[in-house]
Image: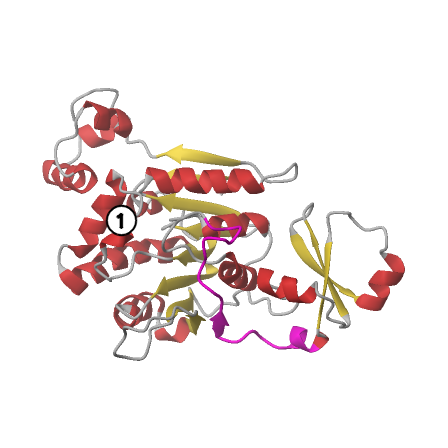
Amino acid sequence: MPINKLILGDNLEILKTIEADSIDLIYLDPPFFSNRNYEVIWGDAGETRSFQDRWSGGIDHYIGWLKERVEEMYRVLKPTGSIFLHCDWHANANIRVDILDKLFGSENFKNEIVWFYHRWTNTSKTFQKMHDTIFWYGKTKEAITFNKNGYPPTSSQLKKFEKGWDQNVVYLKSKRVKQYIVYNREKFERNCKNIDTDARLVYRETSELKIAPPDVLEFSVINSQADEFIGYPTQKPEDLLYKLIYTASNEGDTVLDPFMGGGTAIAVADKLNRRWLGIDQSAMAVKVTELRLQKQQDLFSAPYAVQLHKYDYDTLRYKDAFAFEAWIVRQFGGTPNAKQRGDMGLDGKAA
C-alpha cells in the first residue's frame, strides 16, 4: 500500500480490489448481531443499507454476510499476517466455528482475548454481561509478529506512573517519533538529560517486561469526559487498540480496518507509525475519522488520502443484467436518482 487511505464504500467491493498477500494486520469490529437500532449511528444511506442487509435473514444470513467479507480479508493477508475479529456474545460462537475455523483453520487460532469493562446495571436477572470477545488468528503457521517486550503502557497506566512510581525502567514517549523507547533508568538519567522536550518519562517494573500480556484486557468504556470521546456509541478505547496493534505488528506494517466506524484503530495505527487502510460505508464515519486524524497530525506525520469510491461506467454498463440488478439493489435499494448517479461516478448517465 503506497499511502494511508480512508475509503468510502462497501468493504466487500473494495476488498476485492486489494492485492492478495499485501496486508500485515487486520482489525475488524463489525456490527454485532444484536438487532439494536442504536447501531445505526450516523443515519446516512450507506450505514442504513448495511444494517438492513445483515438482518434480513436472521443469524444464518448474518454469518453469511460476514463470512464473504472475511474470505476477502483472508485473501489480502500476508502469509505472516494475522487478524483480530471483535464480537460479543450474540454471535461469537457462530463466528468462531462457522467463519474463522473454516477459513483460517483451527490450527492457526492464537488467542481468545477478553475485553473486560465495568458497566453496572441493577435490572439484570442474569450475571451481568461485561466483556467482548476478540479472536486472534494467523493466516498460516509461518511466524507472526508478537511484540511482548517493551510493551507500551496505556494512558491510564501513564497517569499512575507519573505520580512517581520508583522503578528501574524509563519509558520515553516522544511526539516527534511517535513511539515508546525503553531505557535503563540509571543510564538514561546519566546520559540523556537533554532529551526531546516533548518527551514524557514514566517508570515501570522491569519484571513486567519479561512476561507476555494476559488474554484478559481490562479497560473502561469511553466516557463523555475522556479526551478521546467523539460521541460514537460503540467507540472502543484507544488503549485496547494500542495493545492489539502494538503486539501484532511492527512500524511500517500495513493495518487494515474494514469496518472503520469511529476510526479508533486507524488513529492508533497512525500514532504507532503503521501504514493503514480504513474502509466504511458511511460518509460520516469517513469524515469523523478524517477530523480525528487531523487533530493528531504534526510535522512528522505521514500523509494520507481520502477516497470516495467511484464506479467505472463501461464496467457497469456491460455487466450481466442479473449481476447488475443485484449490485444496484445492494447499493441503492432501487434505480439510482440523478444525485446517486453522480455519487457513483456515472456523470449523470442512466445505468
Tell me if I can see residue 83 in this picture. yes
| Residue 249 drawn in magenta | no
Q: Quadrant of residue 125?
A: bottom left
Q: Residue furthest top?
A: 348
Q: Quadrant of residue 95?
A: bottom left
Q: Nearer the viewer, residue 227 or 296?
A: 227
Magenta span contains residue 213: yes
Q: Nearer the viewer, residue 195 or 39?
A: 39
Q: Residue at x 53, y 67 (%)?
A: 143
- Direction front: furthest residue: 122
Q: Looking at the image, which is closer to me, 34 or 306?
A: 34
| Percent position of residue 349, x then y | 19, 20
Confirm whether residue 18 shows in the render. no
> Farthest residue toward the left?
322
What secondary structure is the magenta-colored segment mainly? loop
Amino acid residing under circle 1: Val
State the residue in front, 322 or 90: 90
Where residue 60 appears, x then y in whole percent? 17, 64
Q: Could you tell me which residue is drawn at 29 percent across and 60 percent down?
A: 32
Q: How many marks?
A: 1
Image x and y of residue 306, in percent: 44, 34
Q: Residue under circle 1?
A: 40
Q: Which residues are magenta?
A: 207-229
Residue 87 left/right relative to 167: left
Q: Position of residue 26 (x, y in %)?
A: 43, 56
Quadrant of the frame with the C terminus: top left
Query: Left or right: 137 with respect to 249?
Result: left
Q: Is residue 300 above or below residue 237?
A: above
Q: How was this image coloured?
A: secondary structure
